Amino acid sequence: MPGIAENLLAVRASIDAAERKASRHPGSVSLLAVSKKCLPEAVREAFAFGQREFGENYVQEGLEKIAALADLPINWHFIGPIQSNKTRSIASAFAWVHAIDRLKIAERLAEQRDPALPPLNVCLQVNVSGEESKSGVTPDELPPLALAVAALPNLSLRGLMCIPEPTEDEILLRGRFRLLGALLADLRRLLPHAPLDTLSMGMSGDMSLAVAEGATIVRVGTAIFGARPRKVDQSL
Ligand SMILES: *Cc1c(COP(=O)(O)O)cnc(C)c1O
């Protein structure tokens, strides 16, 4: 079985290939290694191989890992859904938050982020699939949320994030990613002074499609760390 180093090499190679194929600037896509359900040792191994950006989904698990790895200069991204009673620890321990879809959460993060720290980088999650149960705002709800979040202190509104519905249909997926790119372009016109440079989209199964449609951060877990245990403990 290939190890983490080999997997990282392979993932970086497919990102490079997708960048070239789409005539994108080499290095324009950043790899976020999603380490949820992985032990700190696995993160150390990836770090030793040059990986610096890591993503966590569950607050408690993430905080424990961050503490266990405090000796490493890692940029931690919180990519999971956020409950309002967890914002304080997210605001202090993470550099990025990807999945904001409510103003209340952004307001709490802004209030709780230590002004002595660099601003917390945030992305707004958009429901690009139109599924009722999915998290994320609708495209209609996005402009007012973005305007409000951009006005908050201690946050830097960097862009948009999506998780399309699971499907094998590549045309459909590309359409979802393309929609997120179009929404970001609209936001840039609405907020010409915000540093809106981020499209957080694409995971192990669809990162090349996402890069073809303009992803600047791909969030990749399985392809780096291997399959996670199937049963996820939601309390984490
Ligand atoms: C788990 C997760 C990922 C990584 O998924 P893989 O298929 O393992 O690459 C990316 N983004 C989010 C929001 C996730 O929860």
Image (tube, rainbow, N blue to C red):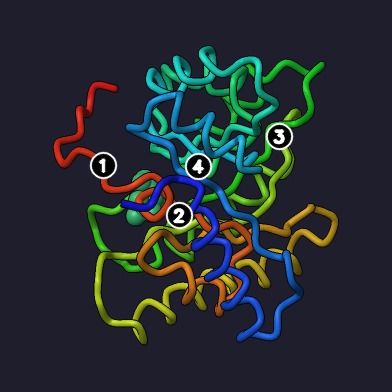
Say which quadrant the C terminus sits in.
top left
User: How far apart are labels 3 and 1 at the CA level?
Assistant: 32 Å
Q: Could you tell which of marks 3 and 4 lies nearer the N-terminus?
A: 4
User: How far apart are labels 3 and 4 at the CA level?
Assistant: 12 Å
Q: Residue at x 43, y 54 (%)?
A: 137
Q: Which dot, 4 or 2, sits closer to the camera?
A: 2
Circle 4 residue: 100
Q: Which dot, 3 or 1, sits closer to the camera?
A: 1
Q: Position of residue 128 (x, y in %)?
A: 40, 67
User: How far apart are labels 4 and 2 at the CA level?
Assistant: 30 Å
Q: Position of residue 47 (x, y in %)?
A: 60, 35
Q: Amino acid at mark 4?
A: Ile
Q: Is residue 212 left or right of residue 20?
A: left
Q: Amino acid at mark 3?
A: Leu
**In the rendered image of this protein, does residue 188 appear above or below residue 179?**
above
Q: Residue at x 44, y 15 (%)?
A: 64
Between 102 and 13, the residue placed more toward the observer is: 13
Between 15 and 96, the residue placed more toward the observer is: 15
Asked if the residue at tag 1 contacts the one at tag 3, i.e. Cβ–Cβ closer than 8 Å, the answer is: no
Q: Is residue 196 left or right of residue 184?
A: right
